[in-house]
């Protein structure tokens, strides 16, 4: 196959318009920035407007919304329990609510729709594509699960939540909300690591938080579905933008191999970028039981020839 000469996503922009070719990316940024904004503006609203009720109090690990709704990161609470901390009732309620949500919509939705570090790693991935940076050696993706195990062993050994002291997610949050200067050093390190050392290196190969949520949401209902995979023209744009690109091929080529159209891998972040950049609308959001969403038209014409010749 000849190398593509057009920029990634250019065909989608030409076919659908700029907004539709970036719709899910824009919505993710709105989600991430809005969550951060809630934490930033809440104390100012209390001081300036003399409000007694906070919009949201706490941080991404543990928060209370409107002094009523507790939300607790299950990974953090698990570390705390292993360190010997007895969880408060509100923390337990918060964990139950969070687990129920991610069991429904997908654990790694946290990575693409909530985590502020995702904006950093996405920027590194974009610049990496623009500069044409390619590094031959990559860390194995299983490394993140070893990192996850380490975050759970350290509390047992030390009696403290060691990981949260260096967690880039927590440090970036503190840097944005409280202006802690040293946090930006670690965040810059993550950016440079993804840019120069390993493609999608932090989120895809090292981050234990992503590993934890991939396990949590392994049976979630919300999935990306290659509902129109008959139309695939092998442009490869979805592979270029997907942070877990190896999960795409099985469903795209499933008509030939007997694999269903639903991306069932727990490592899918439901970021929607494959939906955005596809000029022929191969992908859409659906359920894990979305077999009936697939178009039943036979594979004919140039599209079939391109797939079999790829």
Image: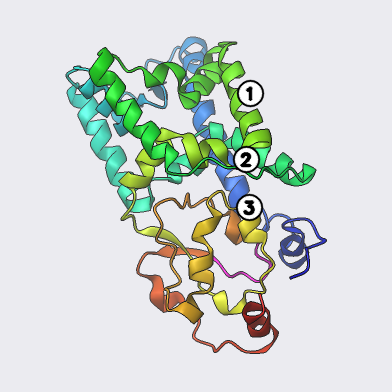
Q: Position of residue 57 (x, y in %)?
A: 39, 20
Local secondary structure at mark 3: helix
Q: Position of residue 106 (x, y in %)?
A: 38, 50
Local secondary structure at mark 2: helix
Tell me, for residue 188, which label it has, or none.
1
Labels 3 and 1: the sequence-earlier one: 1
Pick the residue in front: 35 or 176: 176
Give yes or no for residue 281 being in the magenta stretch. yes
Give yes or no for residue 98 being in the magenta stretch. no
Tell me, for residue 241, which label it has, or none.
3
**Where are the magenta residues, as a range?**
276-283
Magenta stretch, overall SS: loop
Task: Name the residue located 51 percent from the left edge and 22 percent from the top edge.
Answer: 173
Local secondary structure at mark 1: helix
Residue corresponding to mark 2: 122
Pick the residue in front: 134 or 116: 134
């Amino acid at each position: 196959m000849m190398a593509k000469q057009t920029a990634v996503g250019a065909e989608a922009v030409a076919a659908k318009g700029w907004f539709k070719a970036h719709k899910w990316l824009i919505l993710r940024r709105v989600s991430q920035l809005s969550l951060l904004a809630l934490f930033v503006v809440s104390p100012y609203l209390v001081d300036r407007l003399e409000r007694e009720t906070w919009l949201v109090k706490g941080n991404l690990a543990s928060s209370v919304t409107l002094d009523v709704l507790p939300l607790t990161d299950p990974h953090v609470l698990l570390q705390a329990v292993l360190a010997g901390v007895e969880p408060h009732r509100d923390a337990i309620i918060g964990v139950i609510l969070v687990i129920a949500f991610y069991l429904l919509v997908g654990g790694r939705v946290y990575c693409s729709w909530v985590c502020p570090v995702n904006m950093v790693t996405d920027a590194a991935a974009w610049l990496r594509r623009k500069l044409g940076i390619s590094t031959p050696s990559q860390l194995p993706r299983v490394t993140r699960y070893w990192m996850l195990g380490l975050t759970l062993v350290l509390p047992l050994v030390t009696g403290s939540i060691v990981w949260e002291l260096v967690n880039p997610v927590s440090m970036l949050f503190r840097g944005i909300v409280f202006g802690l200067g040293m946090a930006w050093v670690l965040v810059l390190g993550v950016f440079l690591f993804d840019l120069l050392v390993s493609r999608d290196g932090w989120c895809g190969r090292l981050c234990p938080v992503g590993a934890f949520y991939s396990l949590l949401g392994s049976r979630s209902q919300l999935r990306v579905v290659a509902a129109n995979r008959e139309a695939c023209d092998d442009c490869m744009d979805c592979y270029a933008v997907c942070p877990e690109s190896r999960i795409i091929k099985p469903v795209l080529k499933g008509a030939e191999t007997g694999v269903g159209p639903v991306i069932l891998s727990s490592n899918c972040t439901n970021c929607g970028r494959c939906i955005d950049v596809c000029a022929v609308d191969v992908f859409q959001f659906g359920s894990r039981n979305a077999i009936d969403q697939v178009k039943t038209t036979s594979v004919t014409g140039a599209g079939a020839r391109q797939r079999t010749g790829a």
